Amino acid sequence: MNLRSLNFLNGLGRDARHFAIIGLGRFGRAVASALHSMGCEVLGTDINEKLVAQALTDKIASHAIQLDSTEPTALKEAGIFEFDTVIVAIGNYVQESIITTLNLKEAGVKTVIAKASSEIHGKLLDRVGADQVVFPEYEAGCALAHTLTKPAILDRFDLDPDHSIVEILIPAEFDGKTIAELELRRCYGLTILAVSENDQKFEINPFPNRRLRKGMAMVVIGSNKDIKRLPI
């Protein structure tokens, strides 16, 4: 269960199937590849001809074209303004990122998701109308920190600054007990969403009499404060 992918993809909308991605660096390529593999129509663009050619060679997008996204005319001619969702993956060029985002919003693009490389960059993107700002490096760093300090946490999805969904290994203290016996909601304020054994498929909404064993994994939802109280 890949929870981290939800952190970005949850903002795209369940019915969205067509996406334009501006910037085909590492982040843009990763998003394009993930969406394309999910069966979505993806138009990738970049000012760098080599990155466009590489995207076509690697087949990570349905279409890929070279253009300068700071030029509204180029965006219009490429049909970018017709997309409901556009991802601005230009993280290292702040001026180009902001101008591109502004161009898209002024043209009426419904949802613009922009990558930020710093807090100030993120604030500027908010100011020019970005509907969602993402910080991939920051989020990856936080995920690594959680993994290093809490190795029993296999995956994590932050719902907001105070609440998360986490996949964790069953601690030794829970070994042999049923979900009912653990009383996680009363003792920890947490709810079990799913359990898995031996890397098999997750059992969603398991019954209270489901017995847990060390080495199994469970997915719980709750406040970060309560999650930290788990014996992991």
Image: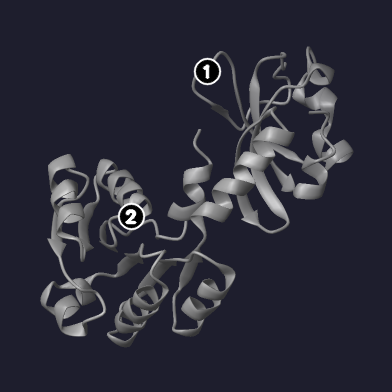
Q: Looking at this view, is 4 or 96 the one in front?
A: 96
When asked about the image quadrant of residue 38, the answer is top left
Q: Is residue 34 shown left or right of residue 167?
A: left
Relative to 126, is 7 above or below?
above
Judge whether residue 223 can be spotted in this image: yes
Q: Position of residue 180 (x, y in %)?
A: 80, 26
**Residue identifier under label 1:** 199
Which structural element holds mark 2? helix
* Dot 2 crowding, Cα within 10 Å, few <14, some 14–19, many 20+: many
Q: Looking at this view, is 54 or 60 the one in front?
A: 54
Q: Is residue 171 shown left or right of residue 15?
A: right
* Dot 1 crowding, Cα within 10 Å, few <14, some 14–19, many 20+: few
Q: Is residue 15 shown left or right of residue 114?
A: left
Relative to 212, is 37 above or below?
below
Count of residue discs: 2
- Residue depicted at 61% across the width and 43% down the height: 143
Q: Quadrant of the C terminus?
A: top right
Q: How is the image coloured?
A: one colour
For marks 1 and 2 on the same chain, the one whose residue lies earlier in the sequence: 2
Which structural element holds mark 1? loop
Q: Is residue 186 shown left or right of residue 83?
A: right
The residue lying furthest to the right in this view is: 187
- Residue depicted at 17% across the width and 47% down the height: 54
- The amino acid at mark 2 is Gly
